[in-house]
Image (cartoon, rainbow, N blue to C red):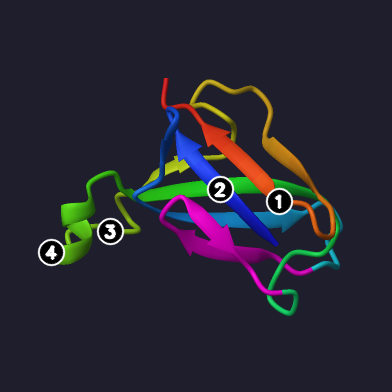
Amino acid sequence: MRGTITIDGEPMVWASVSFIPEDPSAPVAWVHTRGEFQIDAVSGPLAGVHRVEVAILSKDLSDMKSGRYSKENAERYTGANPNASTPLNVEIESGKELHLSIFSK
C-alpha cells in the first residue's frame, strides 16, 4: 500500500499513522511517515474498512535532528479534524493509493 498524508494542506513532517481494521480478527498496520508512506504486502493492512489514527510527532524538521519530538506529546487525530464527530474511516483496496488529509482547525 502506498499513500500520502497532509495536515492543513502540507505534507506531514513526522507522524505515525495506524490503520485499525473493522474486522477484529484482521491485523492492525502502522507506519511512520514524512508525508508519503509505503507498507509492504506482508506488513500492510488487509483490504477492507479501517479506522485511521494519526499521531503528529513533530511539525518542525529540526525536531528530528535534535531528538526533541515525543510520542507522549504528540497531537492525536482520530477524525479528519479535532471537532470531528465521526472517526476517519478509509476503504483499503489492493493496488490503490491512499491520500489522507487532516485539518488542525
Q: Which residues are magenta?
A: 27-40
Q: Is residue 90 magenta?
A: no
Which numbered disc flags the more N-terminal residue, 2 or 4? 2
Q: Quadrant of the C terminus?
A: top left
Instruction: Report how far apart the C-alphas of labels 2 and 1 lie in the structure.
Output: 8 Å
- Above/below status of 42 relative to 81: below
Instruction: Name which residue type carries label 2.
Output: Thr
Q: Circle 4: is it few (<14), some (14-19), or many (20+) Cα within 10 Å?
A: few
The residue singled out by tag 2 in the image is: 4
The residue singled out by tag 4 in the image is: 66
Instruction: Report how far apart the C-alphas of labels 2 and 4 lie in the structure.
Output: 25 Å
| For discs 1 and 3, the disc positioned in front in the rendered view | 1
Dots 2, 1 in contact, CB < 8 A: yes
Instruction: Report how far apart the C-alphas of labels 4 and 1 lie in the structure.
Output: 32 Å
Which numbered disc flags the more N-terminal residue, 3 or 2? 2
Q: Quadrant of the N terminus?
A: bottom right
Instruction: Report how far apart the C-alphas of labels 4 and 3 lie in the structure.
Output: 11 Å
Name the side, left or right, on which 49 lies relative to 77: right
**x, y (%) of residue 2?**
65, 58
| For discs 4 and 3, the disc positioned in front in the rendered view | 4
Give me the disc on residue 12.
none
